[in-house]
Amino acid sequence: MEQPMLTKRERRQLRRQERAAAAASAGRSQTRRRFLIWGGSILILALVVFGLSRLTNKAPAGPVGTPATVTERDWIKGNREARVTLIEYSDFQCPACGAAFPAVQEIMRELGDRVRFVYRHFPLPQHKQAKLAAAAAEAAGKQNKFWEMHDRLFERQREWSDQGGARELFLGYARDLGLDLNKFPAELEAAEADDKIRADQESGWGAGVNATPTFFLNGVRHTGNFAALRDAVAAAVK
């Protein structure tokens, strides 16, 4: 069938409609391209951030299970022959560990003759003075004052935490505790202290520890609050 002849006005109107349709189609295509570009960029950025987070927080590879067997190298308080063993992976600079300190003290005052408490170092990377504090406790331990330094570090946590002069404060604590200051500075920097801290961390990684404080009661990870921990220990000794 022959198409009717269009007037000039109708042809101009038709061309305007065709140009408008083409512009709308191009606009939709550009919007889709922008969406794909932005969406792809966001996805890539999310993957990069996720990957960096995994690299930052990932512990060295190792089997996940219960804490390693208690050894003579561990710092043990209470009854060494007790059937109930409470292990704490802790960071001297961690505020939550500072809050746990009096709870553990209470447990040991009430049940210490029936409990073997083991303290293991797990300094977190965001706590810049935590590893030095752990080394200070190890250095004090070389002079049979580990637990005295352990208590002092938690009792004075606010004093030295995040302080650039923490080392000098630790030397002051050593002096207050009657340690030999001719030996303490060298023991603070000794490779032996670093090795012990690292060994404790590896034990924690192997047990799936990723935060502090983390407690294990007879090899079972405790997930409750401090009051629940005390109740669990009390139930275990019975």
Image (cartoon, rainbow, N blue to C red):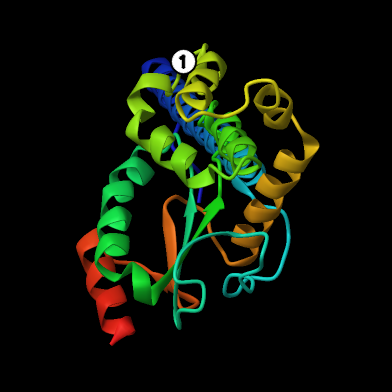
- Residue 116 location (% of width, % of height): 45, 70
Mark 1: give few (<14), some (14-19) or many (20+) Cα within 10 Å. few
**Residue 151 point in image, percent of width and height:** 40, 41
* Residue 72 vertical position relative to residue 54 in the rendered view, above or below: below
Total marks shown come to: 1
**Quadrant where the C terminus is found in the figure:** bottom left
- Location of residue 132 by image quarter: top right
| Relative depth, front residue between 199 and 172 | 172
Q: Residue at x 22, y 73 (%)?
A: 231
Q: Is residue 185 visible?
A: yes
Q: Disc 1 residue type?
A: Gln
Q: In this orientation, does residue 44 appear? A: no
Percent coordinates x, y for residue 157 in the rendering: 37, 29
Q: Secondary structure at mark 1?
A: loop
- Seen in the picture, residue 137 relative to 201 is either above or below; the reply is above
Which of the two residues, 85 or 25, is positioned nearer the viewer here? 85
Q: Residue at 66% of width from left, 65% of height from top?
A: 72
Q: Disc 1 marks which residue? A: 163
* Horizontal side, residue 220 vs residue 191: left or right: left
* Residue shown at 62% from the left, 26% from the top: 180
Residue 166 as seen in the image, left or right of residue 197: left
Depth check: give the residue in front, 28 or 209: 209
List x then y, in percent, for residue 232.
Answer: 28, 76
Furthest toward the bottom, the residue is 238
